[in-house]
Amino acid sequence: MPRLLMIKTTSLGDVIHNLPVITDIKAAFPDMQIDWVVEESFADIPRLHPGINEVITVAVRRWRKHLLQTSTWQEIRNMRRRLRAHDYDHVIDTQGLLKSALIGWQAHGTYHGQDSASAREPWAALLYQQRHPVARGQHAVARNRMLAARALGYAIPSGPPDYDIHAAAPDVALGLPNRYIAGLHATSRDSKLWPENQWIQLGNALLGQGLALVLPWGNATEEARAHRIASAVPGCMVLPRLSLTQLAAVIGHSHAAIGVDTGLVHLAAALNQPTVAIYTDTHPQLTGVLAQDSRKIRNLGGQGQIPDVNSVLEALACVTQP
């Protein structure tokens, strides 16, 4: 059987944006065996897709901090051994970074990537055997799908993206409310946050609709923010720290998700959940949530904009219509 290695290591949103590529490839080549190289912290995401055979994890972020440790170099050797365990027909790097290009360069197979005018880091193109133009100014999902289609020679898909992932049932021990909104309040930069007082107003408004606000977190700062919001919103629930698989289960069984520019809001859209995405410091045209069913999503705001609570509630009503 033909075998392909996919390189998309980070970040969470980028990894999620690559899922439709796997669906496209399996539709064009049902017998294709697909392995995926990804950062260890995001490995749960490709494992959700039924088209993935093997997930190969890397830990570039952690390795950089511990380059003098013997264990780091042992892990790097193990990674290289896994990359070379198969003779791939094709290797595709959709990341377009020098670090991702170097990882894929160590595998055996015809190596595809974006040309120097298209890649995020033009030097990465020097490592590819086959370089493909991928137009800028379009959504990240569309760019990934275009690159894979050109690399493998099938027609560039024109239909909506199919992420083809499904969430398991959440753990009953969590004690989730019967009807809840996943409040995805945390993000990588403070400039992308939605003000806490807005979350509090939103939580209290949702309470009047019989909906509880459920808040995940990933570090101490996010946990503290979640507890501050919950202290001002009756019935609001702060989750324990969960894995991405567990979070997918919580989000996938919510009434809807409301979140800022964060990977989890893209996960909600990928799960085909009603999703309202709030942008305050980035442009949603290129990286906004994109779902198979466009009726289920709304991107609000943009750079220098702070959507108000009423706009979010109106958007929520739209995406949750039967």
Image: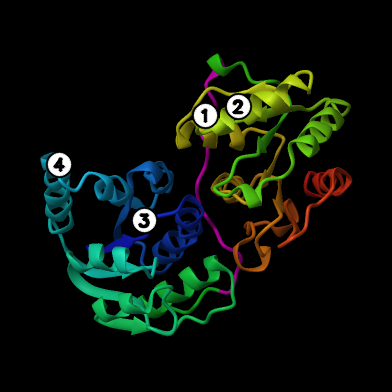
Q: CA distance from mark 1 to mark 4?
A: 27 Å
Q: Position of residue 258 (x, y in %)?
A: 71, 42
Q: Which residue is mark 4?
A: 69
Q: As drawn, is 232 to the left or to the right of 87?
A: right
* Residue 311 percent coordinates (x, y): 86, 49
- Picture coordinates of residue 283 (x, y %)? 67, 65
- The dot on residue 224 is 2
Residue interval drawn in magenta: 158-172
Q: Which residue is mark 1?
A: 220
Q: Residues within 10 Å of mark 3 (few under 14, many from 20)?
A: many
In the picture, the disc for residue 160 is: none
The disc labelled 3 sits on which kind of residue?
Answer: Thr
Helix, strand or loop status at disc 3: loop
Q: Residue at x 67, y 28 (%)?
A: 214
Q: Secondary structure at mark 4?
A: loop
Tag 3 residue = 9
Residue at left 45%, top 32%? 243
